[in-house]
Amino acid sequence: MTQPELRTRPPPTGPAATTRGRRRPANHRRRGVPRGLWIALLLAPALLVVGVFFLTGITQAVAQSLGYQPFLPGWRLSLDAYQGMFTDPAVRASLLLTARIAIIPTVLSAVLGVSAALLIRRLGRSRNWVSGIFQANLAVPHLVGALCMLLLLSQGGLLSRVSHAAGFTDTPAAFPALTGDEFGWAIIAAYVWKETEFLTVIALAALGRGVDDLENAARSLGARPWQRLVHVTLPVITPAVAGGAVLVFAFTAGSYEVPYLLGRPFPATLPVVALQYYNATDLTARPEAMAVAVVITLLSGLMVAAYLFIAGRLARRSL
Amino acid sequence: MTGTAISLTGVRKMFGDTPAVRDLTTDITAGSFTALLGPSGCGKSTTLAMIGGLLDPDSGDVRFDGRSQLGVPAERRPAGLVFQKPLLFPHLNVEQNVAFGLRMRRLDRANTRDRVTSILDRVQLGAMAKRRVGELSGGQEQRVALARALVLEPQVLLLDEPFSQLDATLRAEMRCLVKDLHTESQVTTVFVTHDQAEAVEVADTIALMLDGRLEGQGDPEMFYTAPPSLIAARFFGVTNELPGTVRTGVFTAASTGLRRPATLPDGPAVLVIRPETITLTSPSGDDDTMDGVAVAARFAGTHLAVDVQLTGGPLVTAHAPVTTSVRLGAPMTVGLPRAGGVVVAADLRHAG
Amino acid sequence: MTTTSRRVAAGAAPTQEATEPVARRPLSVRTGRRLLVGLLLVTVLLPLVALLIWSVAGQWRYPDLLPQQLSLRGVGLLFDPRSDILQGLGTSAGIATAVAVLACLIGFPAGRAIGLYRFRGRRAVQFLLLSPVIVPGLAVTLGIQVFFVRYHLSDSILGVVLVQLMPTVPYAAIILGAAFANLDIDYERQARALGAGPVRVLLFVTVPLLRPAIAVAALLTFLISWSEYVLTLLIGGGQVKTLPLLLFAAIGSSDTTAAAALAVLVIAPPLLLVVAATRLLSGRSGNGVGFGRL
């Protein structure tokens, strides 16, 4: 008794692209909707939110910075606001301060974050809850961080009292002024505290299983611990950490709460200056407020470009 | 470049409560190509890692040419390792990957360049020297990994299932490449695999591991004609088992009454016979003939696998030429070679 | 007689069998490492500890290292019906929940488009969606404030919710995009083959498969909204009183205890949520998703 022969159909043609075994939905009509339209529909809400808000906001800001103030009699378009900005002593002092409180925390938190991650990943069972503490701390808002730094670093704060107990200082005034100071020490401290945790989490994520394997390969090729660190581990996690560092830079440069609370009215960082002018009762200060804000945006736009450029180039090197 | 003799003495390794390697003692001849064969979980990769220095044995010794390697970290052992994944450094190109070990040894540029170029030519990747890792195919990546290990002229080459992620044709090519490289360099090679056919094809010695223990070690023919145990026989594809008892050096099969000489102590035993050695058509005078009924015939490409139910006995499978005509249900006479088949202990240790 | 030596042997050969994670390093290195980690943890937690102590400090004059007197006055203030703190808590929670839900709803289809399809302009779309994350919202917010006023959305909760979509939708889209990229589309095809219509496939197959990513996206967007200050201030006009606004004011006041107590209230729900989420998602190793700037 022979079994009826099954006429095998030729295997169905697979969908469009096959990337490493994963397949994308086929290039066919879904429910009568052409693919292009479907994608556009999917993206519409998000692009609407981002696009509409972002683009209209920026255009308005640029327009106002150029003097477009229709509700104010006698307005005219000009570059006065920008010119005024560059001669404004508040802005000039602000540029240096902003650069300082952006660059120093970025560099410090990158170095500390990577070091912390390298330390933590070699822990045994404690690794989970230690990295858990870092992740949980990410949920602490920067505002609270600013308050914490006030409590720790102000002249009446905890560190000052410790220094008194240790015999270094007699009175609150003898302790160096770290908050409300010109340099921005407390601001930097607040950022370093929060952003180190952020970069540690990123570095830990980058230091996953794959890196262990590569280090073993390096060992089998004769690389000693220090050589492995320099030639394998660090190069491999650099893309992720660099991306994170750019995010940190952009954030610290554009943040308001922390510099306002921990710094002085003058010199203040660019965002603080922008809001000072914006809230001024004299509406003619409005264009300059907008100009400062636009400059912040432009600088951050450069950051975006740098971020994507770095990420794009280093993506070829990623695991 | 000549190889080193490797010897393992009483090596044990536990992971938590699970023993991965139990009391392993073996010698690997200098310059040989040994396959460490076994199913997954049998401890072969762990053993390899201990030879290479990536893992410490809990007890026991690992020696290269008689010198103990305990306390010597992987980076200082003269062993090259190639893993399942090529593990090429993503931030370096092909050339830089291959040169990595030489850089770690601080070899000068000129020498490095020469050695890298020549090894890349040897694995036929000379044109890809400047390519980035992401542009290579799986097979090319593994060749780079091989080149990277070999350029260091190691005394021991350890390969951990390096081709298991490649497709069949590529695997065959890579096996040839590794075999050729071994013949040229005579470096002691230990090749871990779970594929018994691959081991047989490529190695001159096979060490079979099951459940953390060395089940047997010898050349491939030995495992076919005289497997050391029932488990080993089954691993190598034996399907015909005739249980019986050994008494004073003679094995008697239970239901069929076949007798064979046996060197085992008295007790239960099993006669294992390879299907290729059983004749269906014209049993010769050297065979024990038995009667039975053909119950199934399967076309297996190169042969016909015929199941014969022996009268009053077990089912045996024979391999017959493809052109044999077999009528199911018809009586058959099978010839079981007197010289073929091995009597092994019936002891069935749990095979991992 | 051979002895096992404890020596440097980091990690194991990357195979399915041999997976020994931890090295046996000499005791001195291990202790040194433990000390460093301890120091690290102290620096990380010290600011929060200071906050906690100050929140229950009654009398705490300089130069004492610990309060002379503990008091629950600060805590009492939190629950005082005359202060707007409880109301602020409700406002914050409500806005954050609304923002999280909306952002995930909007980010879900966007993530699907980005993660699952290859189309021209995909990079540009990602760029555009990423920009609010990187570019500070200040200029944008100052710019759109005019529109919010014009459409009567300023000084309202609805306005605040809408404006907070700006920093949150990108994160939701990115996280869900990554999750969709890792999704095996064959699950959906299989479900269709078994007779499920598109809606049921979505509800019973796609969403459950993406549950961890959705949870992370929801958590993250909630946290971003919860901590948001500048956007709420500018669009809410000071009328919409969320906890960050109240906290900001409290910090400016001279009542440190009250500010500290309020700060503890502000961080309590986020911390609890993060702990709950990590528990829920445990099985994933400690890979952070990069909570970004909060």
Image (tube, helix red, strand yellow):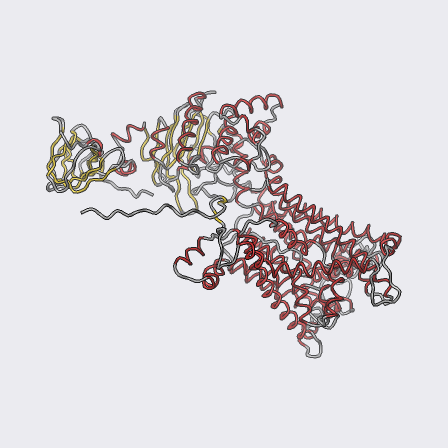
Residue B328 position (above or below residue A62): above
Q: Residue C274's spot in the image, x, y percent?
A: 58, 61
In which quarter of the view is residue C113 placed? bottom right
Instruction: Please state which of residues A317 and B330 is positioned toward the viewer in this rendering.
Output: B330
Residue A51 horizontal side relative to residue B127, left or right:
right
Residue at the (39%, 61%) spot, across then down: C195
Instruction: Please state which of residues A119 and B194 is positioned toward the viewer in this rendering.
Output: B194
Q: Residue C190's spot in the image, x, y percent?
A: 41, 56
In which quarter of the view is residue B203 placed? top left
Residue reaching furthest bottom?
C82
Q: Residue C43's spot in the image, x, y percent?
A: 67, 54
Residue at the (45%, 31%) spot, across then down: B158
The reply to whether residue B269 is visible in this rendering is no
Residue C90 horizontal side relative to residue A64, left or right:
left
Instruction: Please state which of residues A76 and A110 is positioned toward the viewer in this rendering.
Output: A76
The reply to whether residue C205 is visible in this rendering is yes
Residue A56 position (above or below residue B210): below
In which quarter of the view is residue A282 placed? bottom right
